[in-house]
Amino acid sequence: MKFLLMLLWGLSASALANTGVVAQIQAKLATEARAADASFQGFSAQRGEAFYRARQGDWSCATCHSDQPASGGRHAVTHKAILPLAPSSNPERFTDPYKVEKWFKRNCNDVLNRACTAREKGDFIAYLLTVRS
Amino acid sequence: MKRVFIAGMVWAFASSVCAGDHRYGPYPKRYMQECASCHVAYPPELMTAVGWRQVMQQLGKHYGTDASLDAGPQAEISAFLERQASRREKHAPTEASARLSRSSWFVREHGPTLPPKMSFARCEACHTGAEQMDYSERGLRLPAGYLRRGD
């Protein structure tokens, strides 16, 4: 019993810690979005989903991460399996700011041929947080 | 019976010698983290230092995708790759993009092309132990339509 309680405590503590990191990432992006556009009203999961599915040139986010981000994807060039992007399926996602920035930098460049704006990044994360597995 | 056993032992020994070791690693955590997300971690021992330098200088345009790194990890991984690199001419790059799959050794072992929908980037499709750095012949599963060395 005591063990189970400890386990539950551990699990909820790590879940809270993860929620904390993604909230910090979103707060930083919101500050940047507001600085870029004074009329910024907050992130939108709906806009994020449209962004996720929009094909810009050859690829969209969904090309590699699949139409269902709660499922795994496949790399467009190497065909290597990619773990799910939605935190509901893969709690590791958006828990490491270094990784988040690294992949936004690379993948925005691949899909859009430019850097993503803070609003696009925030919308994208907002959408993924709403996806249920 | 005893003779069969001895013959078996000789065969097992001979085949392991002929096949070479074909096992690599383990590699530093940083290399695995940064270079084994989109493809398996390629053994640094299979290309020369000149080749790895060329690859690492072009990470922003890495065979069709952006694989750029921050300066710290970039320097750390470059140093590791060059330290572990092959010193044999057969592993030298043959073009500016320094594709490992175009070295004379690679082409001799694998042939110049693959069946449709296959990629030389995805070692684990045939080398079933590649994720564990095991490229021994025992784990090899060749796809239908694959011709090696112009067979």
Image (cartoon, rainbow, N blue to C red):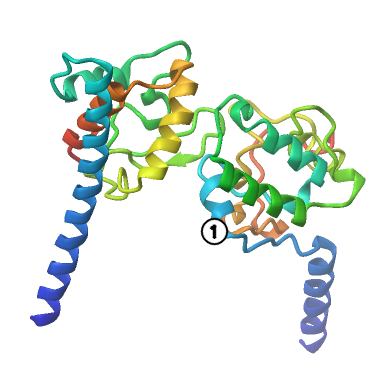
| Residue closest to the far top | A57
B28 or A52: which is nearer to us? B28
Q: Quadrant of the C terminus of chain A?
A: top left
> Residue drawn 62% across and 60% down?
B27
- Describe residue A86's horizontal placement relative to residue B49 as left or right: left
Identify the image quadrant of residue A28.
Answer: top left
Residue B72 pos. (x, y %): 57, 47
Write the residue at 28% across / 26% down: A32
Against B72, residue B101 (above or below) is above
Residue B59 percent location from the top left of the image:
62, 33
Label 1: element kind:
helix
Give the residue displayed 30% in from the left and 43% down from the top: A94
Q: Position of residue B41 (x, y in %)?
A: 61, 49
Q: Is residue B141 visible?
A: no
Residue type, label 1: Lys
Residue drawn at (38%, 14%) of the image:
A55
Mark 1: give few (<14), some (14-19) or many (20+) Cα within 10 Å: few
The residue carrying mark 1 is B29
Q: Residue furthest right?
A: B89
Q: Residue B74: image x %, image y %?
A: 61, 44
Along the line of sight, the residue nearer the viewer: B128 or B94: B94
The image quadrant that residue A123 belongs to is top left
Q: Is residue A85 visible?
A: yes
- Taking the view exactly as shown, the residue that stands out farthest to the bottom is B2
User: In the drawing, does residue B151 fall left or right of residue B99?
Assistant: right
Rendered image quadrant of residue B67: top right
Q: Number of marks in the image?
A: 1
Quadrant where the N terminus of chain A is found in the figure? bottom left
Check the residue under mark 1 and report the chain it is in.
B
Viewer-nearest residue: B126 or A25: A25
Above or below for B118 versus A11: above
